[in-house]
Image (spheres, coloured by chain):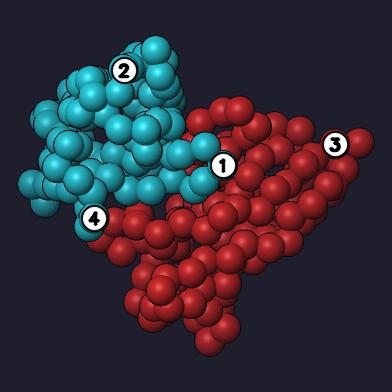
Chain colours: A red, B cyan
Amino acid sequence: EVQLVESGGGLVQPGRSLKLSCVASGFTFSNYGMNWIRQAPGKGLEWVAYISSGSSYIYYAETVKGRFTISRDNAKNTLYLQMTSLRSEDTALYYCARQGQLMDAWGQGASVTVSS
Amino acid sequence: DVLMTQTPVSLPVSLGGQVSISCRSSQSLVHSDGNTYLHWYLQKPGQSPQLLIYRVSNRFSGVPDRFSGSGSGTDFTLKISRVEPEDLGVYYCLQSTHLWTFGGGTKLELK
């Protein structure tokens, strides 16, 4: 069974940093690209970042470019999202999602609240 | 950036009824490889989104044939027939021709 489990969320002050992790199991992690998608409270889905299977291709949404860094460790089956210079508008549930031909598996999300 | 516009925002339905959701993109979603990367997801209350339809009209594994997708270019439609209670939630379209962009969502709820 494909499983994606996010962790690392929490309450953080504006301007500070936070690092999310997503541990994958049930599939060959190194064969898949991965995404981070977020959902602000009561709002819709927003794609945040993508990383290819071997980390050669990385893309970001304009809203996070220069502040967030996506990375992965295929030996540890783990995806990361390093978030810096956090703003109140970054408050959201952050999902990791597998990207093969399709974005077909999602985790349950890690909650990030940016507030003083 | 590609803008995805979904209508309506809210869609009341009676069980057993039929509904349609529209998704329009600000530019063509036909990829240089000839495919159109427009997909549909359902997010049930308290759950992560689940894939329903991929590349316009293909049902994902386990998705009942009550769900159908159609469209081309910039204009796409999701139809749900014989609506059941488990179909309630928020539907999103997603384009992945030009990076990734979600539509704003359509909440399917009981009349």
Mark 1: amino acid: Gly
Asked whether A100 or A85 is in front, the reply is A100
Which residue is identified by label 2?
B14
Query: Which residue appears at 73% of the width and 46% of the height?
Result: A112
| First of labels 1, 2 by sequence position | 2
Q: Which of marks 2 and 3 is in front?
A: 2
Rendered-image quadrant of the N terminus of chain A = bottom left
Which residue is identified by label 4?
B62
Residue A115 - label: 3
x and y percentages locating residue B108 in the rendered image: 38, 23
Instruction: Tell me, yes or no, whether the two marked residues, 2 and 3, touch with CB atoms within 8 Å.
Output: no
x and y percentages locating residue A49 in the rendered image: 50, 51
Residue placed farthest to the right in the image?
A116
Q: Which of marks 2 and 4 is in front?
A: 2
The disc numbered 2 marks a residue on which chain? Answer: B
Rendered-image quadrant of the C terminus of chain A = top right
The disc numbered 1 marks a residue on which chain? Answer: B
Q: In this view, does B95 lie to the left or right of A64?
A: left
Q: In the rendered view, would you say B88 is above or below A49?
A: above
Q: Is residue B101 left or right of residue A84?
A: left
Which residue is identified by label 1?
B46
Q: How many angstroms separate mark 1 from mark 2 (CA)?
A: 22 Å
